[in-house]
Amino acid sequence: MSGRWRLVLCAWLATLSASAALVPLVDSSSWLVQAAALLGVQAVVGVLGRQAPLPRSVTLLAQVLVTVLLLTASFVAERALLGFVPVPDTITAFAELLRDGGEDVGRFAPPAPLSDGVRLMLVSGVLLIGLAVDALAVTFRAAAPAGLPLLTLYSVAVGIGGGDAGWTWFALAAVGYLLLLLAEGRDRLLRWGRVFSGAPAARGGRVTAGLESGRTVPVRTGRRIGAMALGIAVAAPLALPALDGGLLDRDRGGDGGEPGGGTISAVNPLVSLQNSLNQPENREVLRYTTDTPEPQELYLRIVSLDDFDGNAWKPSVREITEVPEVLPPPVGLSPQVERRGVTTRIEAADWYAQNWLPMPFPMQRTEIPGDWRFEPVGRTLVGDHGQTTRGARYTVESLLVEPTAQDLANAPAPPPEFVREFTRVPDSLPDVVAEEARRVTAGASNDYERAVKLQDWFSVDGGFTYDTEVTAGTGAAAIARFLTQKQGFCVHFSFSMAAMARTLGIPARVAVGFTPGSPGTDGTVSVGLRDAHAWPELYFEGVGWTRFEPTPSRGSAPDYTRAQRPSDTPSASAAPSRSASAAPSAAPSRTETCSVEQRRLDGSCGAASPSAAAGAAGSGEGPPWTGLLIGLGVLVALALPFGPALWRARVRAVRLGSSPGRTEADAAARVLAAWQELVDSAWDHGIAPDPSRTPRAVAARIVRTAGLDGAAGAAAHRVAEAVEQVLYAPAPRAVAGLGDEVRTVRAALDRSVGRTARLRAGLAPRSAVRLLWAGSERWTALRVRTTGALPRWALLRR
């Protein structure tokens, strides 16, 4: 490969490696493949222009022109001349797509859905940066300044992702930049000719001149310098406390000091709550099982917001400690109040990563691996040193407190320090908030009755409506505006009730987490993004922090807040009140039934935007044949390294299909396919198959070698037992759920190995060699058939 082509290839790779930092921002990475193809075409145009040779400015202009044509053909072909030549209407279409993309970026929390507007922003941004890198590094022969546009890509990813672009993305971008520098240095070196290496060297007893026929010494030295510089750049910010807050700064739960202490001051977790409620897809966040017969009371609480400064509710700066084996009793809970112990086993999704741990409240004990710290006042767990909930599996023992209305009505006055801290309201709070609180609670004889009147006013009597698309203001003025407009979602209801309760002298704060979720047929409960919720907690001496539910059509109103006369017996479980339901509402509001994309495309949800209509009209028209062939060639070249991974993913999907089959043969084939996938998954993780062993022995070997936990080990043995009954039973029967069993084992295998082994299992699976074996067998069979047909063909010729 010539030096110029090598430089072009490294510039292309450097741009793609820096662009990879944008992958976590959206829920699909298909845009990166499209950007890589178009970027390759752009680079080839630059090579052709430089070989012509054209002036540098003309080459750059030609690349700009081709880039515009490619973007036109890819995104707005139906509003262009011949499908790729821009016209005035094309500019309007681009403007509409960019506007829609900007709205989606502002509306959704990462990872956002990959809409056409977001795709255009990502692809065009990468092409623009790629053009700058190619022009600087190749056209103008200045590779060092090309790092600035690459740094821009990474900085954008960090800024939008809120710092979630970790060190791996930075390292990937840095390696791409170093490759570019090395390619440029090698190209310069090749034009120097023979290199003088310094002092003479002795070879075989003779002293040779200091001339090296190769270029090994300078290239090796340059690599060492580059690797050392990259290592220092990555390690220095992590080793020096004074450099806290740089591009590699992680969102740490504690202060990074001693493991057992420190303080915690978190960002407001409500920033993305509205985005979660408006997601077009209700992605599963958590899945849990519990032993309580009343799961509608099992809110999964993440964090409490107890500091209201007039602009927002947020967590106070608190001391954090080691997690005790058994937590101290909940503050303010009297032994006379009824309570029951509840055990909940929770599993977080692999994509769900945040610092606070969702748990039932009040928790008593938890079992979870990792670096977690305990915040006593909010009674929460927070991750330290980058610890998140991603893929976490943990068990929580908590209390289900069941106070009676009499317990709350007869609650004594809370301690003065509690009143001072949790009834503070800012001076900027409009007077109308306190006035409205007094008006609504007129006639109440105690704080409990006042709290119930506030809840019922918001959820039933006050004329409020639930709408997730109103402006999510959280300041003092926003509360007054909400009381007037009477439209909002859980943030507005919980913030307003907590503020009004504080004006009445009732200690109050806001809790953030998830409603109980939707139960499944297998005994598990699924919690999705749209179950994100906020609710007020009010303090009553003798009961402690007590949940209320002012938001209509969300969650469930606690039994002790329903209309009843105070009694001395615990309130019995009853059906949900008319203000709330434990299950999803049968008639969701307009904002729940119509997603953002539906509102754009479906006339029943609202008028479709011009950009959406244009996108739908032109979905069948593609780019010109020349660009399509070039792009297809680039895509094939990019897909080759990922061929084994794609083949394994396809085979896995076929093997683990949910249908058990209609006949006994189909059922047996399904069982054997699931077993084959289990064996191949273990092979991908380094446990080679052994055909000489029985299925039961193979499963035991996999469990023992990988050190699988109880659930995964039991799943592996159940698959093995299903294989044995299919192979040896007189009448094999269908076995359901084997796909889930294999997925459980595969997830445990992923956890049992390090990151490098996990990446190899996904990108270069060992079991992909079966594809070569199958190809070899087919080739041999073809040769046998061909050889056998030759004599017959010779006879026909005669």
Image (cartoon, rainbow, N blue to C red):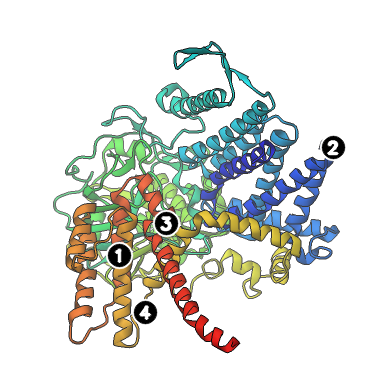
Question: In this rendering, would 660 be left or right of 108?
Answer: left
* Disc 3 crowd, CA 10 A, few/some/many (<14, 14-19, 20+): many
Residue at the image point whose x is 18% and y is 80% from the top: 728
User: Which of pointers 2 and 1 lies earlier in the amino acid sequence?
Assistant: 2
User: Which of pointers 4 and 1 lies earlier in the amino acid sequence?
Assistant: 4
Look at label 3 and name its amino acid.
His
In this view of the protein, which residue sits in the foreground, 309 or 72?
72
Extreme residue toward the front, this view: 798
Label 2: which residue?
A: 55
Q: Quadrant of residue 37 in the image?
A: bottom right
Label 4, secondary structure: give it. loop
Q: Which mark is residue 659?
A: 4
Residue 59 x, y percent position in the rendering: 81, 42
Observer-side mark, 4 or 3, equals 4
Q: Separation of disc 4 and disc 2 at Cα?
A: 63 Å
Can residue 389 be seen by looking at this rendering? Answer: no
Q: Separation of disc 2 and disc 1 at Cα?
A: 59 Å
Look at label 4 and name its amino acid.
Ser
